[in-house]
Image (spheres, grey):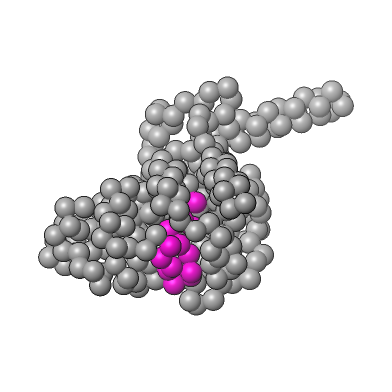
């Protein structure tokens, strides 16, 4: 084989890699918009594959037993071992296709990249699968109603003491509402007396959730209530530290600058 042939092969391989990067970008964009539809186990796998594709193998320390969500995410990522970035990208795209064979028909690539935001990562993931949707109504809890964005049932059953209760995942109703980007429910809970800076079992506030999940609407609303941007979770991270989305980071940094100016 001549050198020119090798150069052609390298160029073709490089081009194929670029095309797959674009497809992976479209897939992450698609998953970001379907986060409220997929089951928790699928979101956990997407998270692990995304981290493997963008950051490589998991070498960080295993979170403590008290950090249930972080522990679940670490375990899923760690189990991928030394899978290559390219293989993780392919597995991510293949999983989207398996869940939704026609997913690409509804997505367009503009200028060679996915339209809108990219780089989505799931942060707020349950350590156990979300309850089945056919769960009998009489057995559903307030947490179920929030997860299903059922504001009507929440209005009927909410009591003041419910606002501070944490479920088995260590999350309050306000954390779940933010996780679901359920703006009307967030507003309702706040009006009923929920603390905008309420902490979960890992000391994360709703602002941490909005930032890490990429929920722009929830983030803007919480900031409008002057949610504390400097509070840190058990890992010492602020809402800015846990944000991966470019738009979210920009909003937070702009807000922080405005607050710093007002404090002078």
> Does residue 79 show up?
no
Viewer-side residue, 160 vs 116: 160
142 relative to 94, above or below? below
Image position of 50 (left or right of 2): left
What residue appears at the point 31 percent right and 72 percent down from the top-left corner? 165
70 relative to 106, above or below? below
| Quarter of the image where the N terminus is located | top right
Most extreme residue toward the right is 3
When asked about the image quadrant of residue 166, the answer is bottom left
> Does residue 82 show up?
yes
Most extreme residue toward the bottom is 65
Most extreme residue toward the front is 264
Image position of 182 (left or right of 142): right
Viewer-side residue, 121 vs 177: 177
Q: Main secondary structure of the magenta part?
A: loop
Viewer-side residue, 235 vs 38: 235
Is 32 covered by the magenta stretch? no
* Span shown in magenta: 197-211
Q: Position of residue 58 (x, y in %)?
A: 63, 61
What residue appears at the point 43 percent right and 68 percent down from the top-left corner? 199
What residue appears at the point 32 percent right and 53 percent down from the top-left corner? 186
Q: Position of residue 144 (x, y in %)?
A: 25, 61
Q: Position of residue 213 (x, y in %)?
A: 46, 51
Is 204 covered by the magenta stretch? yes
When asked about the image quadrant of residue 7, the answer is top right
């Amino acid at each position: 084989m001549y050198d020119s042939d090798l150069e052609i092969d390298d160029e073709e391989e490089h081009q194929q890699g670029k095309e797959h990067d674009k497809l992976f970008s479209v897939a992450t964009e698609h998953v970001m918009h379907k986060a409220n539809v997929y089951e928790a186990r699928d979101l956990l796998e997407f998270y692990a594959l995304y981290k493997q594709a963008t950051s490589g193998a998991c070498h960080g320390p295993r979170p403590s037993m008290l950090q249930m969500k972080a522990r679940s995410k670490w375990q899923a990522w760690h189990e991928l071992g030394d899978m290559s970035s390219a293989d993780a990208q392919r597995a991510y795209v293949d999983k989207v296709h398996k869940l939704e064979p026609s997913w690409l028909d509804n997505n367009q690539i503009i200028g060679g990249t996915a339209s809108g935001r990219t780089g989505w990562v799931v942060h707020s993931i349950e350590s156990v699968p979300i309850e089945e949707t056919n769960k009998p109504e009489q057995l559903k809890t307030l947490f179920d109603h929030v997860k299903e964005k059922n504001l009507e049932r929440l209005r009927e059953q909410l009591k003041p003491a419910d606002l501070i209760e944490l479920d088995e995942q260590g999350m309050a109703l306000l954390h779940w509402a933010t996780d679901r980007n359920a703006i009307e429910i967030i507003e309702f809970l706040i009006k009923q007396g929920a603390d905008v800076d309420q902490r979960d079992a890992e000391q994360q506030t709703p602002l941490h959730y909005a930032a890490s999940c990429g929920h722009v609407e929830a983030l803007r609303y919480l900031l409008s209530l002057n949610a504390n941007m400097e509070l840190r979770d058990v890992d010492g991270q602020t809402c800015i530290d846990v944000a991966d989305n470019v738009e979210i980071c920009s909003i937070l940094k702009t807000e922080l600058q405005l607050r710093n100016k007002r404090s002078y």
